[in-house]
Image: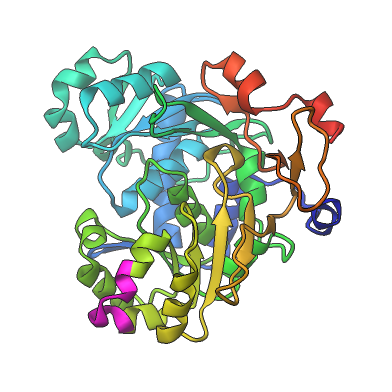
Amino acid sequence: MKNINERNNFVFEFRPVTELFEEQVKLHPEKCAVVSGKESFTYVQLNERANRIANALVEKGVRRETIVGVVLERCCDFYAVRQGILKAGGAFAVATPDYPDDRIRYIFEDSGAPFIITTKEIAEERRELFAKLPCTVLLIEELLENENTENPQVKIGEHDLCYCIYTSGSTGKPKGVLIEHINLANFVNPDSKNAETYGYVSRGSVSLSMAAMTFDVSVLEEFLPLTNGMTAVIASDEEILNPLMLGELIVRNKVDIMTTTPTYLSNMIDLPQLEKAVSQIKVFDVGAEAFPPALYDKIRRVNPDAYIMNGYGPTETTISCTMKVITDSRNITIGTPNGNVKVYIVDKENKILPDGETGELVIAGLGVGRGYMNLPEKTAEAVFIDSQRRESL
């Protein structure tokens, strides 16, 4: 593994994703940045809306390490809001409007979010819940009335908090995973040694966004396109649940990049009506489940030239940490580390094991986030290794 780890290192000057997005605004001002339903924004339009939100948040006191909650339906302004929060120096934490009261309350109380951004409609529907939360509810309709459309001059540091994503909580209460700006900036970098990102951004131009906005894959679907001059197409809940509608969305918007699970992709391919949509996709970024060998043959049957990536990574390692390009159905693994990420197989004493031995997977490098919200013991003992021990690997 040492040789593999040495091959994927690259040096880059840290620039937060907000600056990377603003650079694309200058390069492609009138290019479509995001589409959702009948609505779409160019890069300039999306940036102006994000700036209105950001400048309004700065005026309300949002600073570095300020977590701002988001409760919105899937729409173009979802991206404007998350971009705006980061531009203001804050970090985002997301809950969906259909979450039960207890889950929403837990997320925003645990994260200490002083503000929640939502719509007038959702604020009215969840009025009783929001009234009980120690947060100020900000309406997106009012934030967008801010007249300042200039990029905020907020300095963002490498280790400033970028976002907090709450896990499913299947093993108990949900844990808030803290990801810093350096983690996300490294992930979206299109350097050829950053194989998954390079494979994603170099082979297509229009990507599909269908992950739940509460999942870290939604961060990939937003920030990879917007920091690399591409177009993101946000599928509605109805389109995600109806593969035929999703197929129409793909064809209509000329989508050629798709991030999905093996199960969902397999079900799509099984429908003859979706053959045109699937054959249009140039890049499949597949993950979250084991990649079944039969899926490779299925994809090749309808799309012989597709670039198929099998990604792996827990939320704690910034979306994905390893990737393998799948070229046959016999040798399917999680591949090699992404750029500036290192992986090791170790024994109980944290000693690196030779090839072929079974042990525990240790992930290190710029992909590893800060830790867990309000769980210092869990951060220090259960998952995250301190810097001194990390250097010894």
What predominant SS class does the magenta segment belong to? Answer: helix
Can you say whether 179 is above or below 327 in the image? above
**Where residue 271 appears, x then y in whole percent?**
25, 76
Nearest the eye: 299 or 281 = 299
Residue 33 visible? The answer is no
- Horizontally, is 133 left or right of 220 in the view? left
Nearest the eye: 70 or 331 = 331
Can you say whether 308 is above or below 341 in the image? below
At 22% across and 21% down in the image, what residue appears? Answer: 130
Can you say whether 32 is above or below 274 in the image? above
Q: Residue farthest to the left? A: 125
Residue 372 visible? The answer is yes
Give yes or no for residue 274 being in the magenta stretch: yes
Give yes or no for residue 350 being in the magenta stretch: no
Residue 327 is drawn in which quadrant? Answer: bottom right
Residue 145 is drawn in which quadrant? Answer: top left
**Where residue 8 appears, x then y in whole percent?**
78, 57
Q: Quadrant of the C terminus?
A: top right
The figure's colour scheme reads rainbow
Q: Which residues are magenta?
A: 267-275
At 44% across and 21% down in the image, what residue appears? Answer: 111
At 28% across and 15% down in the image, what residue appears? Answer: 133
Nearest the eye: 259 or 68 = 259
